[in-house]
Image: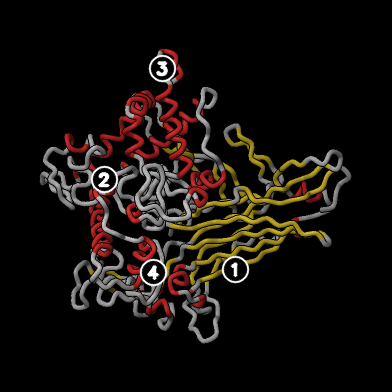
Amino acid sequence: MPADGTSRIVGLFFHPPMAVARLGSSGTPLEAFEWHTARGAHSQNQTLLRPAISFEVLPDSSIRPYLPGEVRFKDDDGAIRPVAPFFELWAEVQSSVDGKCHEEPLTPALLRKYGLSVDHLWFRVTAANRKAQRRTGSAACACIARVEARGSDYQRKALLGTSPHTQGQQPLVMPDNPIPLGWFQLIRPIEHEADVEGQKVDCGVIRLRITPGKGNSYGPPTATTAPASPLQPGQALPAACEDGRIHEIVPPENRILSADTPWSKFVMMKGHYLDTLPYDSYEGANVGENISWAVLDDACDGLIEATLASGFERLRATARFFSGPPAFAPDHRPFYSVADDLADREEAPPVVDHSTYDAVKKEIVDLFRRAFDVASMLNLDAARSRAIEENAMWLALAGDASQKVTGANALWLAVSGGPPLPESELSPKLDKESLTAKDKPYVDKTPPLLPGQEISTFSRTAAYDPLPYTKVVPFVHSQFLEEPILLDFLREHAAHVRKLMRPPFASWSELPERAPTVTSPHRRDPRVFRDKLHDMRMPPYMRDSNFYPLSITRRQYLTLMAFLDYLEQHPKTPQTEAAS
């Protein structure tokens, strides 16, 4: 960009570069909040929410920064408030004197400094729901919205998704009946610095807001009513059976999709299509032939682009957003977040020594507290039963050579091998003995806490304890909220903790050229059959995005293992106790 004699704009970027929007039918977006740890005598270091500086978009499209007195997730009528993230546009400015660069928010004042204005900016937002396209392989089953705006256009714009026209194929979403995927709005910059509880907020930064859809579902005219089947995805009730509560699939006003598309003919687990993972996002009908109801929701992924043009120069910035379901337990933090996934790709595990001990300890303590947040929400009885049944299915398919296996089952077994497992591979237990007294040496706390629990696929206990495993989980995990107790446990039971943690899948560079014949205790290989079966190792019976047993990230796992090594090498002394 043109220089003012001492500097020039050499780059643009969005802050943040990525954000998650959450669906909600309320017209009032959710206010901002932060997680923090309660420190009260009786709070047990649990996660609490604290209001953070929020923006109200005024009628003239400018913002009013304020600190809310409370955070409300629903309106009085029960409508869920959507999470509608803001994105700021920043500039990278290079000095003409020494060539060094610094970053600062892009404002009208900064643009004027270089002879530019907001009219030199151009924005484009593309949002798409490609769930049906991904399953059918048909581009005509995608739902895509695209909106453009000049930098001085502050009108709120709807992201109306339709299907692209492909010769010889019927579009799933017609142009005259688009699916609303949300809204995009540029915020009017006002050259004013607001003071909010002692914090300065520059209202002149160039910002935009993405508001997601309302959380509605859409379908063809045939998506009327059906029973809510109790079966797992991929399993179907007989056509004459209506086992389950009859419910409305799609409201009449949303039955706007085309009925004659590949999505209307999609069949789960029948070999007609390559069934993509995870199955849980499949909008189908577990009845009869298991033909899809051709339902599509208004969740989407999106790309934001900004271009600053001056003469023949163009600077470009991009950001991404993802819209999905509301967080129904917002005061419970995930132990495996998007941030953890990015750190796993970009950061090496820290070396644990005297200089890094405090920082690593803080990370490990936080990991166990987040594990408690997740564990306290998990229906462990249901997850355990489902995992045991899935294990039984895959073991039966792999071990019965006379059984004819087709479709996704055949594909799964072809890439996983699936030979009968040797005795050494049957621990931890894979069947109804999992997480019982028989599951030694992995299980130690559950048997004495559930003395009446029989060995079974489904929980069997007293009539007043329908979820015995679920009831035990908070009791076991809550003690680790206290840092001294956690550190003592890790130091005294390091070997047991190593055994309890399910290792992550190895990175590509760690995989041997030929698939191992047995599983490794320190890493998993996606080509090894046993490494894709569920057991009680932590996190127990949970699934990742590929339907395989979930683990913590590779970086989290290696950090925890290195921390355990350090604790073993430094027995508890008055000095280490004081450091803790």
Identify which residue is drawn at 41% across, 45% down.
523
Residue at screen point 22% across, 39% down: 440
Which residue lies under the disc numbered 2?
A: 427
Q: Which mark is residue 577?
A: 3
Marks 4 & 1, CB-CB < 8 Å contact: no
Task: Give amino acid for label 3.
Answer: Glu
Residue 460 at x, y percent in the picture = 13, 48
The residues bearing labels 4 and 1 have C-alpha atoms spaced at a distance of 29 Å
Front-lying residue, 170 or 125? 170
Q: Name the N-terminal-most of marks 2 and 3.
A: 2
Q: CA distance from mark 3 to mark 1?
A: 59 Å
Dot 3, crowdedness within 10 Å: few (<14), some or many (≥20)? few
- Where in the figure is residue 464, as x and y percent of width and height? 13, 44
The number of numbered badges drawn on the structure is: 4
Residue at 43 percent of width and 67 percent of height: 297
Most foreground residue, 89 or 455: 455
Inspect the image, locate mark 2, and give the three-letter code of the amino acid beneath it. Answer: Ser
State which quadrant residue 279 falls in.
Answer: bottom left
Say which of 194 and 276 sits in front: 276
For mark 2, does the 10 Å Cα neighbourhood hold few (<14), some (14 to 19), or many (20 or more) residues?
A: some
Q: Secondary structure at mark 2?
A: loop
N-terminal label among 3 and 4: 4
Query: Disc 3 vs disc 4: Cβ atoms closer than 8 Å?
Result: no
- Tell me which numbered mark, 3 or 1, is placed earlier along the sequence: 1
Element class at badge 4? loop
Question: CA gap, disc 2 to disc 3?
Answer: 36 Å
Name the residue type under label 1: Arg
